[in-house]
Image (cartoon, rainbow, N blue to C red):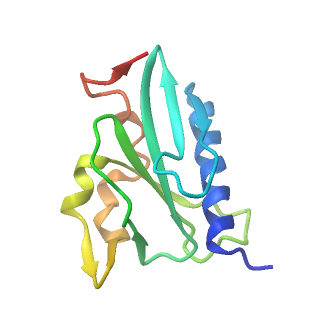
């Protein structure tokens, strides 16, 4: 059975949460379909938010609802047409939200980012708590 976009998104949120827990972060997945924050992350009493964008293919990802916010990151999950093959791990790109605007291409009413623009952010996990203005809880 081929997964639809909703299934791809949910699977990706849980995949990213799993990777965060493995790195020692506390990760809390938000519920609902119309949310702008998919995961809240806490480490050492500091908090950030993550929006997960996923695609089964490999060319571009829609970023219409992405907004620039302090301590907010976009994590792109790209399955490279291997979503159904659980032996193949997707590529993950971690991008601070303030970097997104420089990568966007607009096509009609859609904002998209191409995988080729994300290269420097592949597995960029260390960027989460580098900023000095991270929210303390």
How many numbered circles does the render carry? 0
Q: Check the image and report above or below for 82 versus 52.
A: below
Image quadrant in which the N terminus is located: bottom right
Residue farthest bottom in this picture: 108
Towards the viewer: 111 or 43: 111
Q: Position of residue 64 (x, y in %)?
A: 36, 67
Which of the two residues, 100 or 92, is positioned nearer the viewer here? Answer: 100
Q: Residue at x 72, y 72 (%)?
A: 84
Residue at 49 percent of width and 21 percent of height: 43
Locate residue 117 relative to residue 82 in the image: left or right.
left
Instruction: Examine the rendered structure and indicate whether residue 55 appears above or below residue 102.
Output: below
Spot the residue most to the left: 102
Residue 37 is situated, as x and y percent measured from the top left of the image, at 48, 45
| Image x and y of residue 106, in percent | 25, 77
Q: Residue at x 41, y 70 (%)?
A: 62
| Image quadrant where one finds the C terminus | top left
- In the image, is 5 to the left or to the right of 70? right
The relative height of residue 55 versus residue 48 in the rendered view (above or below) is: below
Identify the residue shown where x is 36% and y is 40%. 72
Q: Position of residue 38 (x, y in %)?
A: 53, 47
| Residue closest to the eye, 126 or 6 | 6
């Amino acid at each position: 059975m081929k997964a639809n976009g909703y299934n791809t998104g949910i699977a990706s949120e849980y995949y990213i949460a799993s990777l965060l827990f493995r790195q020692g972060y506390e990760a809390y997945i938000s519920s609902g379909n119309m949310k702008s924050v998919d995961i809240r992350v806490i480490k050492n009493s500091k908090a950030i938010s993550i929006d997960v964008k996923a695609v089964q293919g490999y060319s571009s990802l829609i970023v219409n609802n992405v907004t620039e916010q302090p301590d907010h990151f976009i994590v792109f999950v790209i399955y490279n047409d291997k979503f159904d093959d659980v032996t193949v791990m997707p590529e993950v790109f971690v991008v601070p939200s303030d970097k997104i605007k420089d990568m966007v291409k607009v096509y009609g009413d859609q904002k998209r980012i191409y995988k080729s623009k994300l290269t420097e952010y592949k597995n960029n996990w260390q960027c989460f708590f580098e900023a000095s203005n991270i929210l303390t809880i």
